Image (cartoon, grey):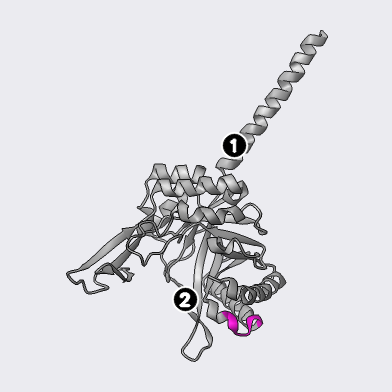
Amino acid sequence: MGFGKRTAIICLGILSMALLLVSCRKDEAKTSMRSVYYWSTTLNMDSTKTAFIKKYSISRVYLRYFDVVDDEAGRAMPNATLSFATKVPMGIDIVPTVFVMPECLRHDRHHLARLIVRRVLQMSQTNDVHNVREIQIDCDWTQSTRQLYDDFMQAMLNECHSRGLQLSSTIRLHQLSQLPPPADRGVLMMYNTGDATNIQCHKPILDMRDAAPYLKYLAQYGLPLSTAYPIFAWRILFRGGRFVGFVHYDGEYPMLPDDSIAIRQPSASDIMEAVKAVQSQRPEANAETILFDLSNNNINHLNHKDYETILNL
């Protein structure tokens, strides 16, 4: 075989391998992890939710177990504990998630961490939630409570690691500019960007004009990140243009002549814009795409084409 032919064959082989690598990378991108939050007081995995999980190959559920709040005596107590009306879906990675009110951070944080981890494990055992490998803490801490949260999370990290568990923390957009808390990883919450109490704010859940200033901190943020995107809507009651409250069910508030209910919901294009913005700043933060949150109403806010586009961007 002549030198020219051998060279051509080698070049062809290199080109084939390069194309194969590109193809594999594309396949990896398409098969990135798909997850959901389940944020309710009752676990009810009915046919609608089960079908959604199967249809979109959801492999992880961040399951809210309980909140931690101060009671009337000022003691940190569990609240709104999840009731298991059905079992957790089979073959799905479950991450128990606990919401902690910032005022609870002023208590004995080591004791609080022990109580939370113990309760999460007891609830998991009682309700046949097997192979829990991670606990997540959600807390809307600010600069004034950052050190308290760091101390608490260090205690949580020690408790989790002593039991072979990982620890993650939600990261709100305004927290990106702060030093990250002690945790194995974080989940960026790409929502709640505006003021829902202002009737003139038409995109309080997700408006990239409000989110953009925070994303300059994303690339250098010091924790591995996944990202959660909103598929929920708010019904907000305004009375004479003034905020009254969020409407959770019909008849929750008496309706007066000057009342109006505003529907606030991110569109598919809003969510896609957010996904692309995160992708441009930190692509690996979209290696796990999380939808917030799994409920029958929320599932129907978008159509199949929109979900496939968001999950495959």
Hey, which residue is sitting farthest left in the picture? Answer: 257
Nearest to the observer: residue 171 or residue 129: 171
Q: Residue at x 47, y 56 (%)?
A: 210
Residue 185 colored magenta?
Answer: no
Image quadrant assignment for residue 214 = bottom right
Q: In terms of secondary structure, where does tag 2 sit?
A: loop
**Which range of residues does the magenta coloring cover?**
105-110
Q: Is residue 229 visible?
A: no
The tag on residue 81 is: 2
SS for dot 1: helix
Q: Nearer the viewer, mark 2 or mark 1?
A: 1
- Per the rendering, the mark at residue 26 is 1
Q: Nearer the viewer, residue 177 or 116?
A: 177
Residue at the image position 54 percent from the left and 63 percent from the top: 174
Q: Is residue 139 left or right of residue 53?
A: right
Dot 1: within a 10 Å radius of its alpha carbon, few (fewer than 14), some, or many (20 or more) residues? Answer: few
Which image quadrant for residue 123?
A: bottom right
**Magenta run includes residue 106:** yes
Residue, x 59% and y 71% (percent of image)? 143
Q: Position of residue 27 (x, y in %)?
A: 59, 38
**Callout 1 amino acid:** Lys
Amino acid carrying mark 2 in the image: Thr
